Image: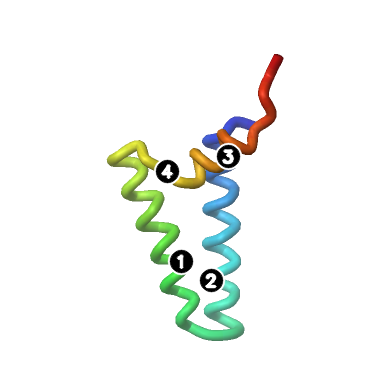
Amino acid sequence: MTVENKIRAFAGSFILASLALAQFHDPRWLFFTAFVGLNLLQSSFTGFCPLEMILRRLAPKSA
């Protein structure tokens, strides 16, 4: 799985989880959904994604 696919899976999982939490727990979880969406939007324009940096550092070094 590529880093880009991991980012998409991570973002999608967080959006779905926060939507479920907003529905069943507290509507303020929608702010987290908005944060994830805004981060995806800004990364599409700037190319800067904090999660990408973290995943690249955690990836095992290939020999």
Residue type, mark 4 in image: Cys
Q: Are marks 3 and 4 in contact (CB under 8 Å)?
A: no
**Between disc 3 and disc 1, whose residue precedes?**
1
Instruction: Identify the residue under disc 2.
Output: 19
Instruction: Identify the residue under disc 4.
Output: 49
Residue type, mark 1 in image: Thr
**Between disc 3 and disc 4, whose residue precedes?**
4
Secondary structure under the numbered disc 1 in the rendered image: helix
Residue drawn at 44 percent across, 59 percent down? 36
Q: Are marks 4 and 1 in contact (CB under 8 Å)?
A: no
Residue type, mark 3 in image: Leu
Secondary structure under the numbered disc 2 in the rendered image: helix
Q: Residues within 10 Å of mark 3 (few under 14, many from 20)?
A: some
Mark number displayed over residue 33: 1
**Between disc 4 and disc 1, whose residue precedes?**
1
Residue drawn at 58 percent across, 76 percent down? 21
Task: State the CA–CA distance, disc 3 to disc 1.
Answer: 21 Å
Q: Is residue 47 above or below residue 34?
A: above
Q: Are marks 2 and 1 in contact (CB under 8 Å)?
A: yes
Q: Is residue 61 above or below residue 17?
A: above
Task: State the CA–CA distance, disc 2 to disc 1.
Answer: 7 Å
Task: State the CA–CA distance, disc 3 to disc 4.
Answer: 10 Å
Task: State the CA–CA distance, disc 4 to disc 2.
Answer: 22 Å
Task: State the CA–CA distance, disc 4 to disc 1.
Answer: 16 Å
Residue drawn at 39 percent across, 65 percent down? 34
Instruction: Identify the residue under disc 3.
Output: 55
The answer to whether residue 54 is left or right of residue 59 is left
Q: Are marks 3 and 2 in contact (CB under 8 Å)?
A: no
